[in-house]
Amino acid sequence: MARKTILVCDKCGKEVEEARGAVLRVTYSDARRMGKQADLCDDCAGSMPGQPAARRGRKPKNAAQA
């Protein structure tokens, strides 16, 4: 018998489709406090505050020349 894991958004309670969602992780600067993690759907993840993080590594050659 097969089992299926269903992911539910922690903010709105909707079911998250396959490969459609995000995990929001909060870590505190105080090492004694444990971090928190929330599963979010695309709509809730898009409405979260914050700036997009830059990708790490070297830029592609054609973008680096500009």
Image (cartoon, rainbow, N blue to C red):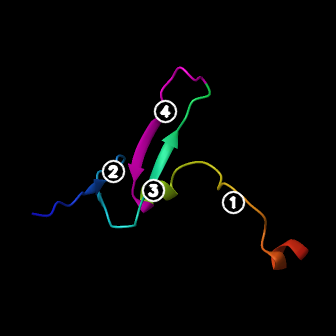
Residue position for label 4: 35
Give the x, y percent position of residue 14.
29, 56
- Mark 4: secondary structure: loop
Give the residue drawn at x 55%, y 34%.
Answer: 27
Q: Amino acid at mark 1?
A: Arg
**57 or 14, which is in the foreground?**
57
Q: Badge 2: how crowded within 10 Å, few (<14), some, or many (20+)? A: few
Q: Is residue 66 visible?
A: no
Give the x, y percent position of residue 41.
39, 58
Q: CA distance from mark 2 to mark 3?
A: 13 Å
First in sequence, mark 2 or 3: give its number: 2
Q: Amino acid at mark 2?
A: Cys
Q: Kindly indicate whether the residue at mark 1 contacts the one at mark 4 (C-beta within 8 angstroms).
A: no
Q: Mark number for residue 12? A: 2
Q: Mark number for residue 22? A: 3
Give the residue drawn at x 70%, y 57%.
Answer: 54
Residue position for label 1: 55
**Which quarter of the figure has residue 31?**
top right
Residue extent of the magenta highlight: 30-42
Residue extending farthest to the left is 1
In the image, 9: left or right of 59? left
Give the residue drawn at x 71%, y 58%.
Answer: 56
Residue extending farthest to the right is 65
Residue extending farthest to the top is 32
- Mark 3: secondary structure: strand
**Is 65 part of what is drawn in magenta?**
no
Q: Badge 3: how crowded within 10 Å, few (<14), some, or many (20+)? A: some
Placement of 16 over or under 61, stated as above or below: above
